[in-house]
Amino acid sequence: MKNPMKVRAVLFDLDGTLADTAPDLAAAVNLMRLQRNLEPVPLAKLRIYASGGARGLLDGGFDITPEHDEFESMRAEFLGNYAAAICEHTRLFDGITELLNSINQQSLPWGIVTNKPSRFTQALLPLLDLQQARCVVSGDTTPHFKPHPASLLEAARQLQVLPQECCYLGDDLRDIQAAQAAGMVSIGVTWGYCGKTEPNGWKADLLLDQPGELLKFI
């Protein structure tokens, strides 16, 4: 993209895009392993699962999927652990505060669209000083998770802008797929977790290596 994007709103994924939540997510898994007399999994190995929520972290920590007989009980245990220590080590990524300040100075509304359940989203945002978000759409706000576009379309509705007037930043292929399905400008960020796929293969409209790079395009 050689010319600035004509957007009227900026939307962000939360885990792996605005905030590095992986340390606390990994700690919730490793507490489960400790209680089962298992060695902890290094954070470096669990980071790629962090954008996948409970499903991803249980896959990374125990190699189980939702089809497993104990998945639901282990999911509840994981979520309980996470709720009890949701922001011990979680921090905004370097450059995010400055980026949001610049967006505010341009009087552009911005919001958050995440697959994270609302009880965790709402608990975390004030601890990270993200209350200025003009809209917050969580994983249970609509009946569908990303990559379905419903949550992004709901954010556009709340902001009273057309979907094509929004850009959406995310660190996972599902974020790009959701943005494309919603008709938004899709922006991949490489500073996040990125899952098991290579960002260059996401076919995003734009890839960013640092938060501040967005300012060249809005």
Image (spheres, rainbow, N blue to C red):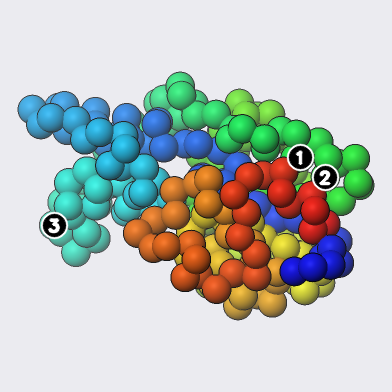
Q: Is residue 147 above or below residue 168?
A: below
Q: Is residue 84 above or below residue 201?
A: above
User: Can the viewer see residue 198 in this picture?
Assistant: yes
Q: Quadrant of the N terminus?
A: bottom right
Three-letter amino acid code at disc 2? Answer: Ile
Q: Amino acid at mark 3?
A: Asp
Res 149 seen here: no
Q: Position of residue 69 (x, y in %)?
A: 13, 57
Q: CA distance from mark 1 to mark 2?
A: 5 Å
Q: Secondary structure at mark 1?
A: helix
C-alpha distance separating marks 3 and 1: 43 Å
Looking at the picture, how far across and down is residue 217, in whole percent?
Answer: 79, 58
Give the secondary structure at mark 3.
loop
Q: Which quadrant of the view contains residue 95?
A: top right
Q: Amino acid at mark 1?
A: Leu
Identify the residue position indicated by label 1 in the image.
100
Task: Find numbered disc 2 in the image and state the secondary structure of the residue it sits on.
Answer: helix
Q: Residue at x 32, y 52 (%)?
A: 56
Residue where numbered disc 3 is placed: 69
Which residue is rendered at x = 59% and y = 49% of the image? 209
Residue 159 in the image, given as x and y percentages of width and height: 81, 59
Q: Is the Cβ of the residue at disc 1 closer than 8 Å to that at disc 2?
A: yes
Q: Residue furthest front?
A: 2
Q: Neighbour class for label 3 at 10 Å: few (<14), some, many (≥20)?
A: few
Residues under numbered marks 2 and 3 in contact, where contact means CB atoms less than 8 Å apart: no
Q: Position of residue 210 (x, y in %)?
A: 63, 45
